[in-house]
């Protein structure tokens, strides 16, 4: 026997619960299905737990730097990983329990626990239950990608989820993958006391960012004692006593790195491979992402895909924006599109990187006339006062329209400062609006107008 709904939402990541509540308030009967953890990646194994660990690691780092600020701390610093985990689990647990709690109390909304699979374009089976709806929204997220590496089946390894439950500091953490996830965990555990080696197949870290950003990030991590091996080809792993060995075959340095723990941080893959999508004629691209249009509609009428599984952002904030786009189009008669979105994101090492819009490389490739401004953090008074002068800020401007094309702020407060630029870009205003502003002194943001006043042609 089938149970009929107006809408079914599969998954409770950042987009699903908010959309469910909005549809329910519009007097639609809604079913929400969750296979595993309510709240999705961000709450359980992503932003919330990792940034909690980043906070603990920063305290450890600042305590060790106390003498730089004229403070003397007697005795050794001991990292209690169990207490760090208890704090992390408490914060995650509160966030995790809030999601099913308010959903179950929402009128017109039923919550199902189990694995959802399509049996047809508008029917979903969850265990013994068969559900039907004209509107179905897929919000199933993504998981850590495990690559085909020789010898991997013979050693223990961690992913970005498993490493969150380590209750002891690794002696030597070897990380395969030199992008955002790997770099954040690398710095976290280095500050907790581990020896850390990051192994990257490419010629530089965070390859989607500009070379100067990549190089500066590398220097920041190396200054903390993190070993970085680039151009690592033919990677393989093997047992080595009580630990493991990673063969890196690099052009420089030893051909093998020995460690106690291995973290795989080489990207994520969408959770679309066990949903019966073929029964609903839903198309996937070559990476397994659901193909959607500019309003997030899948090819089958009445089906949408939101969040990490659609390949349109893979961030918590873009997933929430997916919800806003779908809700605006369905309920508000307000035409909104993914292509209206200006992509911004952060790398939460310390100091953090805030990024928005086009990179310098993308601007150059576009062939447009552009202006560039750049200022090292050593020339930012607030950074000097805080003793955190690593990094720089950079902005690119269209020379004909005077609109900002993109920016990067790598330095103290960079993840917050970048929003002043994002707001101007969203408003489609010329850079002169922010250049003529009078920001607070002393603040990192006050150097944005100064940098914009020193633009020069991009050559």
Image: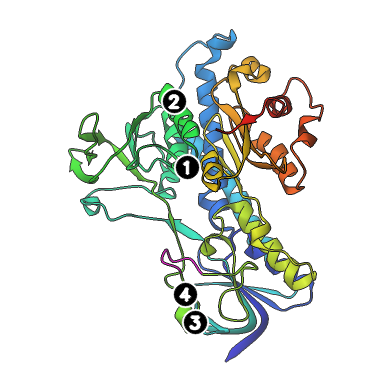
User: Which residue is denoted by mark 4 in the rendering?
Assistant: 275
For the question of whether residue 89 can be seen, the reply is: no
Q: Earlier in the sequence, mark 4 or mark 2?
A: 2
Q: Secondary structure at mark 2?
A: helix
Q: Earlier in the sequence, mark 3 or mark 1?
A: 1
Q: Secondary structure at mark 4?
A: loop
Q: Secondary structure at mark 1?
A: helix
User: Which residue is denoted by mark 1 in the rendering?
Assistant: 180
Q: Nearer the viewer, mark 4 or mark 2?
A: 2
Q: Earlier in the sequence, mark 2 or mark 1?
A: 1
User: Which residue is denoted by mark 3 in the rendering?
Assistant: 281
| Label annotation for residue 219 | 2
Residue 128, placed above or below residue 211: below
Asked if the residue under mark 1 is in contact with the one under mark 3, i.e. CB atoms within 8 Å, the reply is no
Label 1, label 4: how far apart the Cα atoms are: 29 Å
Q: Earlier in the sequence, mark 1 or mark 4?
A: 1
Label 2, label 1: how far apart the Cα atoms are: 15 Å
Residue at figure coordinates x 62%, y 38% from the top left: 370
């Amino acid at each position: 026997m089938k149970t009929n709904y107006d809408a079914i939402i599969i998954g409770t990541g950042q987009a699903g619960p908010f959309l469910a509540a909005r549809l329910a308030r519009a007097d639609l009967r809604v079913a929400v299905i969750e296979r595993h953890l309510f709240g999705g990646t961000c709450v359980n194994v992503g932003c919330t737990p990792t940034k909690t660990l980043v906070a603990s690691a920063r305290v450890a780092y600042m305590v060790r730097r106390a003498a730089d600020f004229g403070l003397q701390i007697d005795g050794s610093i001991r990292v209690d990983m169990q207490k760090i985990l208890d704090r992390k689990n408490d914060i995650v647990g509160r966030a995790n329990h809030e999601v099913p709690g308010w959903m179950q109390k929402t009128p017109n909304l039923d919550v199902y626990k189990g694995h959802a699979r399509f049996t047809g374009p508008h029917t979903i089976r969850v265990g013994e239950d068969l559900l039907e709806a004209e509107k179905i929204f897929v919000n199933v997220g993504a998981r850590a990608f495990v690559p085909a590496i020789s010898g991997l089946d013979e050693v223990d390894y961690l992913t970005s989820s498993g490493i969150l439950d380590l209750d002891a500091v690794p002696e030597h953490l070897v990380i395969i993958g030199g992008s955002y996830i790997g770099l954040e965990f690398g710095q976290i555990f280095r500050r907790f006391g581990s020896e850390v080696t990051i192994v990257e197949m490419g010629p530089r870290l965070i390859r989607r960012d500009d070379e100067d950003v990549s190089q500066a990030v590398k220097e920041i991590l190396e200054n903390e004692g993190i070993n970085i091996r680039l151009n690592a080809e033919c990677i393989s792993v093997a047992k080595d006593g009580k630990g493991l060995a990673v063969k890196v075959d690099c052009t420089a340095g030893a051909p093998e790195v020995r460690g106690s723990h291995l973290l795989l941080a080489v990207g994520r893959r969408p959770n679309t491979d066990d949903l019966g999508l073929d029964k609903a004629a839903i198309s996937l691209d070559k990476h397994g992402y659901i193909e959607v249009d500019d309003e997030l509609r899948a090819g089958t009428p009445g089906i949408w895909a939101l969040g990490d599984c659609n390949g349109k952002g893979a961030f918590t904030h873009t997933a929430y924006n997916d919800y806003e786009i779908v809700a605006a189009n369905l309920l508000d008669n307000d035409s909104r599109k993914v292509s209206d979105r200006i992509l911004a994101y952060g790398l939460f090492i310390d100091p953090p990187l805030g990024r928005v819009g086009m990179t310098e490389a993308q601007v150059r490739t576009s062939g447009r006339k552009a202006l560039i401004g750049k200022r090292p953090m050593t020339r930012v008074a607030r950074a000097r006062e805080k003793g955190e002068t690593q990094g720089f800020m950079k902005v690119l401007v269209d020379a004909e329209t005077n609109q900002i094309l993109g920016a990067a702020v790598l330095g103290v407060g960079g993840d917050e400062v970048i929003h002043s630029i994002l707001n101007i870009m969203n408003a489609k205003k010329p850079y002169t609006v922010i250049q003529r502003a009078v920001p607070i002194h002393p603040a990192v943001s006050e150097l944005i107008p100064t940098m914009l006043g020193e633009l020069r042609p991009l050559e």
